[in-house]
Image (cartoon, helix red, strand yellow):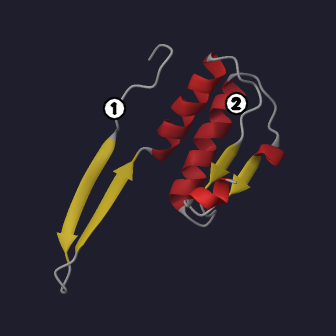
Amino acid sequence: MDDKLDGNVNGSLNGKMDGKRKVTIAAIAREADGALRATEYLLRLGHRRIGFIAGPPQLLCSRARLDGYRTALEAAGLPMDHRLEHAGNFYHEAGR
């Protein structure tokens, strides 16, 4: 990956039918890797103060993404500024 994010998504997509004939789709992605790569991309562009809006902290995917973000900052030798980390709810409005 040079100066852009590639379009590859690592993970799997699983679907199942429940008793009401609704389809439940579960996308299982490498949450930490995605956040790590996105943060590394911003670091390569020269950014040094990068904010992070996670999902609800009780969800494993939210914690994994936060870990990836923090890992990238640590690898770059940047201090953690927890004032730039916020919990959201996966809705656009949470990022305002």
Residue identified by numbered label 1: 8
User: For this view, does 47 lie left or right of residue 14?
Assistant: right
Q: Residue at the spot x=55%, y=59% of the render?
A: 90
Amino acid of disc 1: Asn
Q: Secondary structure at mark 2?
A: helix
Q: Is disc 1 placed on a helix, strand or loop? A: loop
Q: Is residue 1 above or below residue 18?
A: above
**Above or below for 78 versus 70:** above
Using residue 79 as the reference point, say whether residue 35 is left or right of it.
left
Q: Residue 67: where, in percent of width, then height?
A: 62, 44
When the figure is inspected, residue 46 is found, relative to residue 91, above or below; the finding is above
Categorize mark 1 by other alpha carbons within 10 Å: few (<14), some (14-19), many (20+). Answer: few
25 sits left or right of 81 in the view? left
The picture quadrant where one finds residue 80 is: top right
Q: Nearer the viewer, residue 90 or 85?
A: 90
Identify the mark nearer the N-term, 1 or 2: 1
Q: Which mark is residue 19?
A: none
- What is the x, y in percent for residue 96? 70, 54
Q: Which residue position holds label 2?
A: 73
